[in-house]
Image: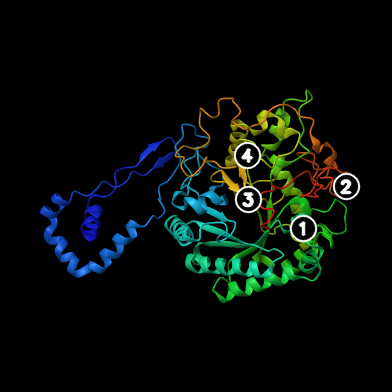
Amino acid sequence: LKLVGFLGMAQRGPTPMQVESSSSTRARPPACDFKKLTSTVAGVVLFSAVTVGIVGYGSALALNRKTVDSSFNCTTDLLLSSSMAKPQGKGLAMDDATFSQCSSKIPVRWPNTHEDVTSLRLFKAWDSQFPASNRQRAWNDVIQYARTRGAKILIGTQISCDAGDDEKDWQQVLSLLNQLGSNNTLAVAIGNEIELLSAKSGTTEKCVEDLWVNGQFFSRVMKRVKDLDDAGFQHVQLTTAMTSAVFAPAGNAKPFMDDPKRALVNTFLQNVTTTLKDRWTFSWNIYPYFDPNLHLDGNGKTCSTALRTASDFSSSGYVPSILVAARERMAKLTGSSKDRMWVTETGWSSPKAKTLDTVVGWCKDWNSAEALRDYYEGFLAWDLDIGNGDVGPERVFFFSGRDTTNFGIREYFGLIPDCNSTQCKLNTSTCSGQSPAGGGSGSGSGSDEGGRGSGSGSGSGKGSGSDEGKGSGSDSGEGSGSDSGSDSGFFPRRRRTDYV
């Protein structure tokens, strides 16, 4: 019966996809009419069962398993871009919800566009908090997605104070890589914002000393490089995602942070770029959404100026200006102005992220669907130029596909609300000028006012106050400033504080 059903489905095929605007969902293939099928192709079925029964049975079993729906897209009546700039240089960072719960619904096209997604970022191969029973199915879905669509995957692996746990994570990464193959592997990211590990609750001074002063971070990186080479991944790019918290103030002898109590970033980058040369990529996570140096308007209530600044992707805009500052420091470190550079995370939350505690975050428009639309639309239209005659990023990843919960804290960076949603988050009804639920309101006095330190500033002199000398306060003892320590005008997201 499985074989009969398989042949009947192969003959009839799926119904045409229903297309609305830039999105589509594939209809289920119609149920087989077994009586009609038996009367018309009984001879063919019998012959096929004898000659290729094993192959047919195996194929039928494959159809019965939940695999990636290669045509999934959210529906919308709001088209943001009919021609996305540099689509081959832009990728989607996969959220935990999609990966662990609905990996069969990875968007094929960028929501609200006609453009295909060509690369994905996985933060890790699997999380211990995810259901173990879902792991192989999720891997199969990602692999099929990549092979069917020719997509490339950036896979992350953790670096923490627990070397044993890191090794377990790494073995899972190797297992996934071996199944995925080198042709569909873009790069491996070893560590994510590890420069912030010292600020994490529970991190000991010995851990920081071992990783940075005693060189364990570098040695773990090189061990993973050897493992990759032995597995046939000699040409895969390597990176670690960092934030502009590692930027040393302009004029410093060293371009990047080199503090033994926090992170010897400059020393590490010198060693890894000297050893791996062109195989190493500089990667930056950039979130203007969390920047405390973006302020309310003069009336103390609205935030139109800050929103324009944050969502500006022109050559003098926020993200490009941060990358100009990064490029200056990279060139000072390596002597080259053309080192490969990526943006491994950027995005916008709507409704308000629970971790947002800046004064401008109390402005209702800051967390509105319109703000997400403007930032996302700017991202789509960005040609990856950063001005100043500098070489821009080769790739940029947008976070994320869906809203998700990380370590009990709800996040709203998704372009799709959740796994059960068929509609995109952005449509004409959500972008009607109303702040979504949970968006926050009022000007607020802002307990973070005291969190602005007296940093010397490290920006390029453009954009969002990156040269105003307003840091996080973590160097001056004022305010919370517990997770950044950056004087660069940019604060990273605080979503994976126990996964660095």
In the shown orientation, is residue 72 left or right of residue 222? left
**Dot 1: within a 10 Å radius of its alpha carbon, few (fewer than 14), some, or many (20 or more) residues?**
some
User: Visible in this render: residue 144?
Assistant: yes
**Tags 1 and 4 in contact by the CB under 8 Å rule?**
no
Q: CA distance from mark 3 to mark 2?
A: 28 Å
In the shown orientation, is residue 158 left or right of residue 146? right
Of marks 1 and 4, the one in the foreground: 4
Amino acid beneath label 3: Phe
Amino acid beneath label 4: Ser
Q: CA distance from mark 1 to mark 4?
A: 33 Å
Position of residue 324 relative to residue 338, above or below, is: above
The residue at which mark 3 appears reads as 407
Q: CA distance from mark 3 to mark 1?
A: 37 Å
Residue 331: assigned label: 1
Amino acid beneath label 2: Gly
The residue at which mark 2 appears reads as 477
Residue 143, image x, y percentages: 46, 60
SS at mark 2 in the image: loop
Residue 419, image x, y percentages: 48, 45
User: Visible in this render: residue 118?
Assistant: no
The disc, 2 or 1, on the residue closer to the chain's N-terminal end is: 1
- The N terminus appears in which quarter of the rendering? bottom left
Residue 288, image x, y percentages: 70, 41
The disc, 3 or 2, on the residue closer to the chain's N-terminal end is: 3
The residue at which mark 4 appears reads as 349
